[in-house]
Image (cartoon, rainbow, N blue to C red):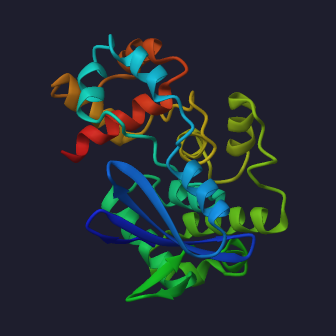
Amino acid sequence: MYAIEGNKITRAIEVDDHIHIFQLSNHEDKLRIDTYEGNSQVVHDFVTEWLDLHYPLYSFYEMATDDPLLSNVIDDYRGLRLIGIPDLFEALTWGIIGQQVNLTFAYTLKKRLVETYGHTVPFNNHSLSLFPNPATIAELSVDDLLPLQLSRRKSEYLIHVAKRIAEGSLSKTLLSSELESAEKQLTSIRGIGPWTANYVLMRCLRYARAFPIDDVGFQNAMKHVLHSKDKPSKETIMGYAKHWQGFEAYAVFYLWRTLQN
């Protein structure tokens, strides 16, 4: 889905049944967006949401400056924004696929799904993949997905979510603007528990207070930053998180980043 060459990323997106192809690059320490096909305003709006460019980072940094876990982390990754997944179906799919498996295998499953049920757009020397449309997945049977090594239960969840989105009973606009209500709406859907719901609230719906507290990667990041032999208890996590109120999503994202070193 991403063609990466040096400091340039090229990708294709589908918005309202139209294909848009664009490239991001670093130009004199500024983000440059070149639209090669489609509407440049649509691309601009997508990139703004994808990279969370409207978020006031200075507010997060002001909170994190005196935080025992985040003060050093923000110095290491200053300027990093919470890279999101603007498409609700892709975000929910990633959350469902990632349940109780390691990140490497989750990436493998997503790659197989995209290669099997997405479609590609040729551009220069690249074949840019688009994430599968929910209407396509909604028409599948569980047996269609099992060869990808998705479990039967995850296949059921994925098809159910695809049907909900395809029929219009689930969308970003239908989800509440209040975090607690939106979480309840999501967790009422079969296969979506608190972790998946908060992952989607954080990465797709941009709730700053979304907090996937049960995320194993987040717990390992806290363990790493605390130089501890054991993962922190929920009580320990909540003790630190009291200082993050209103910034939980960014705190988690920055701590995740420490695991990539």
In the image: residue 143, left or right of residue 241 = right
Q: How many numbered markers are drawn? A: 0
Residue 258 in picture, x, y percent from top left: 25, 38
Residue 19 in picture, x, y percent from top left: 64, 77
In the image: residue 52, left or right of residue 222 = right
Between 54 and 211, the one lying in front of the other is 54
| Farthest residue, direction front | 28
> What residue lies at 50% left-to-right and 79% top-to-bottom?
129
Between 245 and 27, the one lying in front of the other is 27
Residue 125 in picture, x, y percent from top left: 37, 89
Quadrant showing the N terminus: bottom left
> What residue lies at 68% left-to-right and 80% top-to-bottom?
136
Question: Does the rendering let one see residue 92?
Answer: no
Residue 171's place in the image compared with 127, above or below, is above
Quadrant showing the C terminus: top left
Residue 122's place in the image compared with 29, above or below, is below
Residue 115's place in the image compared with 190, above or below, is below
Residue 167 in picture, x, y percent from top left: 84, 67
Between 149 and 52, the one lying in front of the other is 52
> What residue lies at 54% left-to-right and 34% top-to-bottom?
55
Q: Quadrant of residue 210?
A: top right
Q: Quadrant of residue 21?
A: bottom right
Between 253 and 170, the one lying in front of the other is 253
Question: Does the rendering let one see residue 190?
Answer: yes
